[in-house]
Image (cartoon, grey):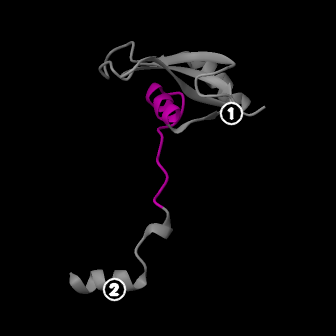
Amino acid sequence: MALKIRLARGGAKKRPFYRMVVAENTAPRDGKFVERIGSYNPLLEKEHSERLVVNIDRAKYWLSVGAQCSVRVAKLLGEVGVLDEYKPHATPKKSTPKKKAQERLNAAV
């Protein structure tokens, strides 16, 4: 049973509200979950106390058991201090210009 900590969307159309849940990775986004550990309301100001509410003890427990975070949840848990600050992956080397293109760019400059 692989577990993920992710956001489940709630709220009305154009008015999102998210629950931070621990769910099996095969469960639907808004479907069955194991435990609710917090909530996130992106419409509130960043300084508002209700914007991000997390049960830190339960989040640490699920991470210690082996639950994986989604990218957004990793950023949010980094804000609270449960995880280290999220660092995005570096751009892959495949996307860099090839040798001839680099030569043309250097010649143009």
Residue corresponding to mark 1: 25
**In percent of the image, x 47 and y 48: which residue is there?**
88
**Cα distance between the residues tagged 1 and 2:** 46 Å
Q: Look at the image and tell me in which quarter the N terminus lies.
A: top right
Q: Residues within 10 Å of mark 2 (few under 14, many from 20)?
A: few
**In percent of the image, x 65 and y 16: which residue is there?**
35
Choose between 102 and 79: the one closer to the eye. 102
Dot 2 lies on which element? helix
**In percent of the image, x 60 and y 21: which residue is there?**
21
Q: Closer to the N terminus: mark 1 or mark 2?
A: 1
Q: Which mark is residue 52?
A: none
Residue 27 x, y percent position in the rendering? 68, 28
Q: Which mark is residue 103?
A: 2
- State whether residue 85 is above or below residue 62: below
Choose between 50 and 43: the one closer to the eye. 43
> Relative to residue 60, is residue 108 drawn left or right?
left
| Quadrant housing residue 98 | bottom left
Q: Which residues are magenta?
A: 72-91
Does the segment drawn in magenta span residue 86?
A: yes
The answer to whether marks 1 and 2 mark residues whose Cβ atoms lie closer than 8 Å is no
| Quadrant housing residue 13 | top left
- Mark 1 vs mark 2, foreground winner is 1
